[in-house]
Image (cartoon, rainbow, N blue to C red):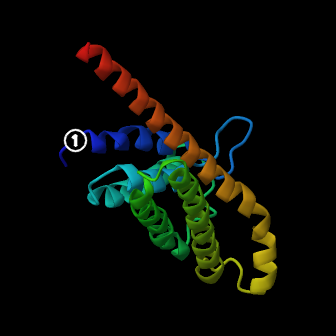
């Protein structure tokens, strides 16, 4: 893939995913997983669709390394793991849809945040619902009980995705302001 100005955003996004993929919600020693926001921001800022597949492969490789090299639990590895593809695709597609609102000023940014939260909510349902249905770990548990059990993780799941998305928007905005300032200096 040709590395264009628009596609250079993929490098820090890959680094962020690699740095945070070890723990879903973070700990005293690690940040929460930024993968949802990475897919959302990539959909928003990266022009080539092939990067969706690239990010999916990177996520799989990072999980493989975490489990086999860093002794991270393989609890989530099950037939449901494949449902991370539609989970992350929802985030990617929401980011791509948000391109329509990038020029809408402050209202556009508020809409981007709302869509980041909404898509992360859908991602939560896909990933947790598929884990319930296909992991084989909850055959004897009623779906209502499972839903109540995992609902405690919903605020952190969506909150981390939105927080990373907000940080990403802020970084892109700051870089744009700095580049404009440098461009104005050169014009003088």
Percent x, y for residue 136?
64, 80
Residue located farthest toward the front when viewing the structure as drawn: 188
The residue that appears at 57% across and 74% down in the rendered structure is 126
Residue toward you, 59 or 124: 124
Task: Using a 10 Å C-alpha cutoff, classify the residue at mark 1 as few (fewer than 14 neighbours), some (14 to 19) or many (20 or more).
Answer: few
Q: Residue at x 69, y 35 (%)?
A: 29
Residue 167 location in percent, x, y?
56, 40
Left of 79 or right of it: where is 49? left
Which residue lies at the image location 51% right of the left edge and 50% below the top edge?
68
Q: Is residue 80 left or right of residue 104?
A: right
Report if residue 140 is visible in the image: no
Image quarter hosting the C terminus: top left
Q: Vertically, is 46 above or below 185?
A: below
The one of 27 and 111 positioned closer to us in this rendering: 111
| Residue 3 visible in the picture | yes
Does residue 127 sit above or below 26 in this rendering?
below
Residue drawn at x 65%, y 38% as measured from the top left: 30
Q: Is residue 3 left or right of residue 104?
A: left
Mark 1 lies on residue: 3
| Residue 164 x, y percent position in the rendering | 58, 45
- What is the x, y in percent for residue 178? 41, 24
137 or 158: which is nearer to us?
A: 158
Q: Quadrant of residue 139?
A: bottom right
């Amino acid at each position: 893939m040709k590395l264009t100005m628009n596609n250079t955003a993929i490098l820090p996004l890959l680094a962020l995913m690699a740095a945070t993929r070890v723990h879903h919600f973070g700990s005293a020693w690690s940040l929460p997983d930024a993968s949802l926001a990475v897919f959302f921001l990539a959909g928003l800022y990266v022009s080539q669709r092939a990067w969706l597949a690239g990010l999916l492969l990177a996520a799989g490789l990072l999980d493989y390394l975490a489990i086999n090299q860093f002794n991270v639990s393989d609890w989530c590895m099950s037939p449901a793991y494949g449902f991370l593809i539609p989970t992350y695709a929802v985030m990617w597609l929401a980011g791509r849809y948000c391109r329509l609102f990038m020029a809408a000023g402050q209202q556009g940014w508020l809409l981007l945040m709302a869509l980041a939260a909404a898509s992360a909510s859908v991602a939560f349902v896909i990933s947790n619902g598929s884990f319930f249905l296909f992991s084989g770990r909850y055959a004897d548990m009623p779906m209502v009980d499972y839903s109540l059990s995992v609902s405690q993780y919903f605020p952190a799941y969506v909150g981390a995705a939105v927080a990373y998305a907000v940080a990403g928007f802020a970084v892109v905005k700051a870089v744009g302001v700095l580049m404009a300032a440098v461009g104005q200096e050169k014009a003088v």
